[in-house]
Image: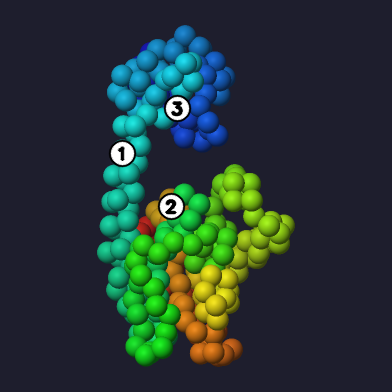
Amino acid sequence: MSQIKTLNRALDILFILTEAEGPLTVTEIAEKTAVPESTTYRLIQSLEKKGVIHRHSGQISLGMRILDMAKTIYEQIDQDLLTHAQPIMEELTNKIDETSILVVRRGNIGVTVHHVDGSHLIGFVVRNGRTHPLHLGASGKAILAFETQKYINRFITEIDVKHHEKLLKDLAQIRDDGYVKTTGEVDSDIVGISAPVFDRINRITASISIVGPKDRFNEQVTEKTMNAVIGSAKKLTQKLSNKE
């Protein structure tokens, strides 16, 4: 077997384990890769020695080493994200004069990783590290709507979302509109207007939002904010994609 062919088959095994709902057997992996079971077994042994997969009682899953690699990649992505987001968010906040926030998904929750405050004495107060459910509030929904259907279905089951049919319709509308506006879903009387941010392979990676008291969002301000948020999210997507 050529080295390139061996590498491709090993990567196929890792991809299958990544997408699987749980551990798989050698037979199941062989069937999914259309590779003879004896060859699959040898590849699994090699990957196990490298620590990128874990085998226990005939069940095979991703190993700790590949999870460490994924953590490193996430940290690098987050640093790139924050570096590029900072000036874009400052520009957005200056334009609207309300707090802008940057949210990413971690598991089934949204996490605020950066914010820029507006100049109002009374405004939305936020801190980095704040969490909230993905299906509540504009910043979470803007991410959830653009996740894979497989993830969305699993999310609804794991979180036991009430009125999930309405949520699915809302997410479909967000995908059509390219943005989302909510009022009071996470914080009482707070409006959130959010748009998705994508990485270089067009995968959802974050959301940018403007948040503030609902009494400051009349129709004209809402439309101005919506356009500004969408524009900022697209600008950040371009930065992350190196498409400038």
The residue at which mark 1 appears reads as: 69
The residue at which mark 3 appears reads as: 61
The residue at which mark 2 appears reads as: 106
**Which residue is rendered at x = 50% and y = 52% of the image?**
108
* Label 1 with label 3: CB-CB less than 8 Å: no
- Amino acid type, residue under disc 3 in the picture: Ser
- Amino acid type, residue under disc 2 in the picture: Arg
**Label 2 vs label 1, nearer the camera:** 2
- Tag 3: Cα neighbours inside 10 Å, few (<14), some, or many (≥20)? many
Q: Which of the two residues, 234 or 29, is positioned nearer the viewer here?
A: 29
- Amino acid type, residue under disc 1 in the picture: Met
Is residue 24 among what the camera can see? yes
Helix, strand or loop for disc 1: helix
Vertical position of residue 135 compared to residue 73: above or below: below
**Label 1 vs label 3, nearer the camera:** 3
Position of the N terminus by quadrant: top left
For this view, does 113 lie left or right of residue 19? left
Vertical position of residue 132 compared to residue 51: above or below: below
Mark 2 / mark 1, whichever is N-terminal = 1
**Which residue is rendered at x = 55% and y = 81% of the image?**
189
Helix, strand or loop for disc 3: strand
